[in-house]
Each structure stands twice: as structure tokens, then as C-alpha cells.
Image (cartoon, rainbow, N blue to C red):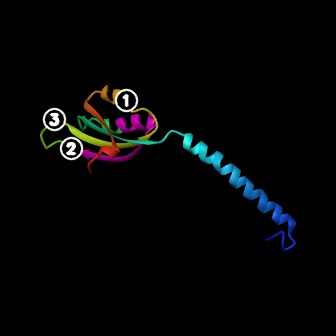
Amino acid sequence: MACGGGLPLPALGATAVHFLVVRGFSKVSDLIASRPSCARRELRISYHSQQGLLGRMLEICTGSGFRVTDVQVETGTGRAGAPAEVLLRLEGAASAHPLVATLSELTGVHGVALGRQDDSTE
């Protein structure tokens, strides 16, 4: 339309932008598709509360390349020395198995269970 209206420079510009989009879009979409996807995982950790472990566990998770999207803490049943449980929902492309091993080695942690968020029944 620009060419028919006697505007050759905007016509050339629009044509150049059209070809950039048509040719470049496939390359950009291939780059995006080749990136590893961020898997969603859940960690259920049983630990002794009142020892500052939750902050340390969150620090280890983020330091391992994961993003913590949700934290749910369930304290003990009121008994002295009863363990607390925390459910951490994580996103990240890294393997979660080294993270589980690191968290399991912390003093005061009773157990770590790994699952995928898609497996959740909530």
C-alpha cells in the first residue's frame, strides 16, 4: 500500500521488517525450544524445628539453582521433640537428586522425599 501511495522508503522498510519476522521467528523459536524446561518438584522434609534449619534448607535450594515457589510448614503435634514437616515446591532445570543428598546430610533432618508437583493430589 505504501508503494502504491508513492512512499517507496516506508514500503522498503515494511518489506524488510516482514522478512526479518518471517525468517527470524523460526530461529528464535528454535532457541527457546532448545532450552531445558523448568521442571516442578516437591520436597517433603521432616526435621527438628527450633534449630533454624528451614532458613538453611531454603538457602541450599536456591543455591542449587532452584526457585522456591511455595513453602508449607506443619509443626509437630504439640509433643516436645516432635518433628516438623515442610513441603517445598521448587522449579528448576537442575537435577534434584544432589539437592536431596545435601539436605539429607543436614543435622536435624530426619528424611527427605522427592516428588514431582504434577503427581500431587492437591
Q: Earlier in the sequence, mark 1 or mark 3?
A: 3
Q: Which residues are magenta?
A: 56-74
> In the picture shown, does residue 70 fall above or below 49?
below
Q: Residues within 10 Å of mark 2 (few under 14, many from 20)?
A: some
Residue 20 position within the rendered picture, expressed as x and y whole percent measured from the top left: 73, 53
Residue 85 magenta-highlighted: no
Report whether 13 appears left or right of 121. right
Could you say which is closer to the camera, residue 79 or residue 27?
27
Task: Identify the residue at image location x=26%, y=48%.
Answer: 121
95, above or below 122, in the image = above
Q: Give the foreground label among 1 and 3.
A: 1
Q: Quick one: quadrant of the N terminus?
A: bottom right
Residue extending furthest toward the bottom: 5
- Amino acid carrying mark 3 in the image: Gly
Residue 63 in the image, given as x and y percentages of width and height: 45, 35
- Could you classify mark 3 by the number of other residues whose Cα lies within 10 Å: few (under 14), some (14-19), or many (20 or more)? few
Say what amino acid the circle numbered 1 marks. His
Return the residue at label 3.
81
Q: CA distance from mark 3 to mark 2?
A: 11 Å
Amino acid type assigned to the residue bearing label 2 in the image: Thr
Residue sitting nearer the eye, 110 or 10: 10
Mark 3: secondary structure: loop
Q: Earlier in the sequence, mark 3 or mark 2?
A: 2
For label 2, the residue is 75
Percent from the top left, x then y, of residue 46? 24, 35
Q: Residues within 10 Å of mark 1 (few under 14, many from 20)?
A: few
State the residue position of label 1. Answer: 97
Horizontal placement of 3 versus 74: left or right? Answer: right
Q: Is residue 23 left or right of residue 116?
A: right
Tell me what residue is drawn at x 81 percent, y 70 percent.
2
